[in-house]
Image (cartoon, grey):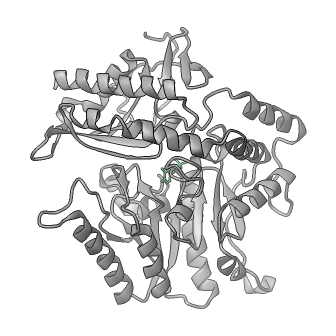
């Protein structure tokens, strides 16, 4: 249904010429979003992968209201606040090996902080030549300049290259698109060898940067078991810091609270975002080990302290919700529920793989990417002229679902607390959407 509101908003990643009007959402309840006319659709993307408990969760909103009445914001420059302190303690206890928490407002800034922290760590240690970064191809770490440099997705960022710094890149183990002549195991070894070669050859590497557990925005690449662990060993061997990005994959998305723990890899620096506040307010956190933190201590005149900060660093309102969010994980046993939902998804994979257009289905926890191709044998992508993203969006709306694609990949990324029945609705709708769209292609 068309809305009648005037629109002055410029939307992200959107050809505005195609979208003169948007559905105007004005209410959310549980898994459902409602537009101004009262039409409901299921939030099939967890409002850009961040929603945990559904919308308008009473325990979260109560914590927000209570905190807003006490203290809405006070700066972390020369002062601290009780909520930021409590949350930092909780996070350090949750995240093995971590010692201190640096707050920011979103995932991109958390990754800028990770990179600056790594650079200044080596600077403080007197190893000033260690200034370069290595990352996995098709990684994604956010949309600000440093984050774009680290996680270069060519389609998104080629226009901005003049403002990016150079980063060395190594191949990522996408099981669906392995070069000819390799088995998946061989290709994994090849990817690891490449990393080892680069780290062995260059003594100026500050850090290796990767998403923890899986790459999402770069094409839903789920790492094979042991891959991340081996990278963390290679980093240790060559005295290179490991920076992990758990902004989208930590806090339950892949079926673990702290994904690097499941991957048996301890980073030097790790960032959380998206689901940290349950998806209710912008908040991110970058955690560092004692080794990193201690290098920033010294006499004032040494200028070793971390030169970074934002207006809303450690915002108590966001921290209060994050505290409430974390307490609910335990109260409702969320991680074990996610594991049950993951089995539910697993039981439908075959059915989905058999659909026309479906080339590959990649899945872990409550993350699923369904890669659509024009030819299952040749794996040729669907041409952009077919306007697949628009068609998927339109058809899924008819099925009562807000769903998006990333390129040719249909994303199924629901709020983590989705029930069995609701997940069935989402999967049934997704299958129907793909069937209807393939009839049009
Ligand atoms: C979303 C995302 C980011 C960026 O977070 P924003 O809050 O959008 O700035 C960084 N890394 C990963 C893996 C993400 O999925």
The quadrant of the picture occupied by the C terminus is top left
On the question of residue 412 being in view, the answer is: no
* Left or right: 386 in relation to 272: left
Rendered position, 35 above or below 228: above
On the question of residue 213 being in view, the answer is: yes
Q: In front here: 124 or 417?
A: 417
* Left or right: 170 in relation to 288: left
Q: Residue at x 65, y 72 (%)?
A: 97
Total labels drawn: 0
Q: Quadrant of residue 413?
A: top left
Q: In front here: 237 or 156?
A: 237
Q: Residue at x 52, y 69 (%)?
A: 264
Q: Quadrant of residue 108?
A: bottom right
* Left or right: 35 in relation to 152: right
Instruction: Give the residue at the far right of this rendering.
Output: 70
Rendered position, 273 above or below 196: above
Q: Residue at x 33, y 53 (%)?
A: 159
Task: State the image coordinates of residue 99 (x, y, percent, origin top left).
Answer: 71, 71
Task: State the image coordinates of residue 394 (x, y, percent, origin top left).
Answer: 34, 21
Task: State the image coordinates of residue 280 (x, y, percent, origin top left).
Answer: 65, 37
Q: Residue at x 43, y 26 (%)?
A: 424
Q: In front here: 399 or 125?
A: 399
The quadrant of the picture occupied by the N terminus is top left
Task: State the image coordinates of residue 386 (x, y, percent, origin top left).
Answer: 19, 30
């Amino acid at each position: 249904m068309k809305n009648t509101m005037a629109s002055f908003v410029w939307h992200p990643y959107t050809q505005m010429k195609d979208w003169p009007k948007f559905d105007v959402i004005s209410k959310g309840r549980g898994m459902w979003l409602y537009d101004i006319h009262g039409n409901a659709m299921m939030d099939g993307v967890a409002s850009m992968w961040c929603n945990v408990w559904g919308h308008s969760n009473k325990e979260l909103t109560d914590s927000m209201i209570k905190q807003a009445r006490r203290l809405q914001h006070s700066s972390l420059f020369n002062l601290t606040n009780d909520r930021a302190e409590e949350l930092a303690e909780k996070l350090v206890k949750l995240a093995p090996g971590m010692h201190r928490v640096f707050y920011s407002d979103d995932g991109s800034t958390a990754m800028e902080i990770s990179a600056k922290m790594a650079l200044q760590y080596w600077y403080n240690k007197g190893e000033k030549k260690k200034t370069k970064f290595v990352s996995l191809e098709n990684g994604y770490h956010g949309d600000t300049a440093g984050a774009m440099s680290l996680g270069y997705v060519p389609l998104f960022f080629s226009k901005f290259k003049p403002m990016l710094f150079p980063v060395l890149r190594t191949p990522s183990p996408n099981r669906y698109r392995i070069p000819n002549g390799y088995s998946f195991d061989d290709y994994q070894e090849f990817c690891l060898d490449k990393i080892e070669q680069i780290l062995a050859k260059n003594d100026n590497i500050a850090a290796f940067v990767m998403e923890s557990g899986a790459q999402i925005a770069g094409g839903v690449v789920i790492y094979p078991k042991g891959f991340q662990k081996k990278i963390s060993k290679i980093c240790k061997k060559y005295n290179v810091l490991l920076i992990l990005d758990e902004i989208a994959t930590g806090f339950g998305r892949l079926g673990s609270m702290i994904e690097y723990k499941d991957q048996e890899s301890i980073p030097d620096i790790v960032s959380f975002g998206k689901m940290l506040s349950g998806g209710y307010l912008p908040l991110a956190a970058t955690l560092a080990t004692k080794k990193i933190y201690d290098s920033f201590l010294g006499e004032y005149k040494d200028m070793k302290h971390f030169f970074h900060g934002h207006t809303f660093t450690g915002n108590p309102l966001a921290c209060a919700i994050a505290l409430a969010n974390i307490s609910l994980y335990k109260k409702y046993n969320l991680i074990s529920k996610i594991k049950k939902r993951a089995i539910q998804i697993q039981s439908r994979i075959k059915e989905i793989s058999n659909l026309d257009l479906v080339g590959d289905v990649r899945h872990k926890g409550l993350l699923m990417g369904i890669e659509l191709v024009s030819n299952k044998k040749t794996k040729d992508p669907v041409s952009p002229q077919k306007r697949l993203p628009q068609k998927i969006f339109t058809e899924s709306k008819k099925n009562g679902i807000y769903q998006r694609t990333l390129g040719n990949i249909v994303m199924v990324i629901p709020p983590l607390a989705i029930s069995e029945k609701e997940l069935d609705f989402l999967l049934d709708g997704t299958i129907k959407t793909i069937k209807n769209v393939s009839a049009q292609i």
